[in-house]
Amino acid sequence: MRWFRSESACHALEERVLTECDHALRTLWPAAVTRVGNPEVQHWSRASLRRSRGLLRVDHAGEVAAQALYRGQALAASDDPGLAQSLLGAAEEEARHLDWCERRLGELGGRTSRLNPLWYTGAFLSGLFAGCLGRATSLGYLAETEKQVEAHLDDHLARLPREDRATRALLEQMKAEEAGHRQKAIDEGGKPLPRAVRALMHAASRALVYGSYWL
């Protein structure tokens, strides 16, 4: 009987790993972004268009990382089905944000970051590690992540070209939903992280922002 339980557990783990690999591939290499002729941008300056594309590329990369983070945490929360389901639900909302960013990039004639596989891998491993530290730490990590995402969305809203009203509306909606994720994580028992951990997360976030803007 013990052997049977062990065999079943191994099979379940194998299925979950395959599911995560499939999700990673679909996130990182979706159908190509369709670039469409957009009369909206015909009268924009080249600098404005370049800035909107760069900022939105960063936001898209952030959503790629959010997908990986939540799914890594959910994988580690196998002994807490309620938490795992909550994390996967948040990941579904982030998938919607990802789709919004991809569509808008297509409208602007932009592209996604070439570094997305790096961001996905790093965020997934980070989420897996945080999830292994327990429910309170995992939720605290989620809350801190969302807090930093809100800050960089505020920065992007301030830097967006004035004429890019569609991207502004998109980012404002994303920010409101990220704030909801953060508050939910706190309400469910997330504890504040040590200052050193928050600083390390901020440094990683800055690397994503800089790398994705240019690459």
Image (tube, rainbow, N blue to C red):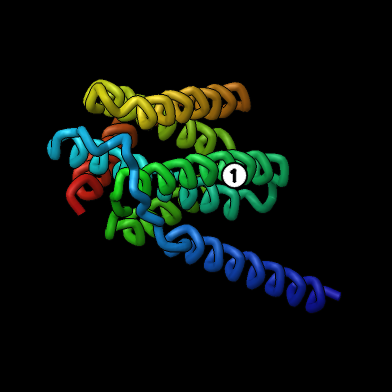
Give the residue at x 30% y 28%: 164
Camera-side residue of 11 and 157: 157
Give the side of residue 74 with respect to residue 111, left or right: right
Give the side of residue 18 with respect to residue 158, left or right: right
Give the residue at x 71% y 40%: 82
Residue 17 can be seen in this image: yes
Give the side of residue 2 with respect to residue 39, left or right: right
Return the x and y of residue 177 as percentages of the image width and height: 52, 27
Return the x and y of residue 61 as percentages of the image width and height: 35, 47
Residue 200 can be seen in this image: no
Task: Quadrant for residue 20, please give it.
Answer: bottom right
Camera-side residue of 61 and 35: 35
Q: Decide: is 142 above or below 77.
A: above
Q: Quadrant of the C terminus?
A: bottom left
Q: Which residue is mark 1?
A: 92
Give the residue at x 59% y 70%: 18
Camera-side residue of 48 and 139: 48
Task: Quadrant for residue 124, please give it.
Answer: bottom left
Task: Name the residue at the right extreme.
Answer: 1
Return the x and y of residue 33 as percentages of the image width and height: 40, 56
Q: Decide: is 110 above or below 181.
A: below
Packing grade of label 1 (10 A; few <14, some 14-19, many >=20) is some
Task: Quadrant for residue 165, please give it.
Answer: top left
Q: Decide: is 167 above or below 162.
A: below
Give the side of residue 206 with respect to residue 7, left or right: left
Residue type indicated by callout 1: Glu
Indicate the secondary structure of the residue bearing disc 1: helix
Return the x and y of residue 89 as percentages of the image width and height: 64, 41
Give the residue at x 53% y 46%: 95
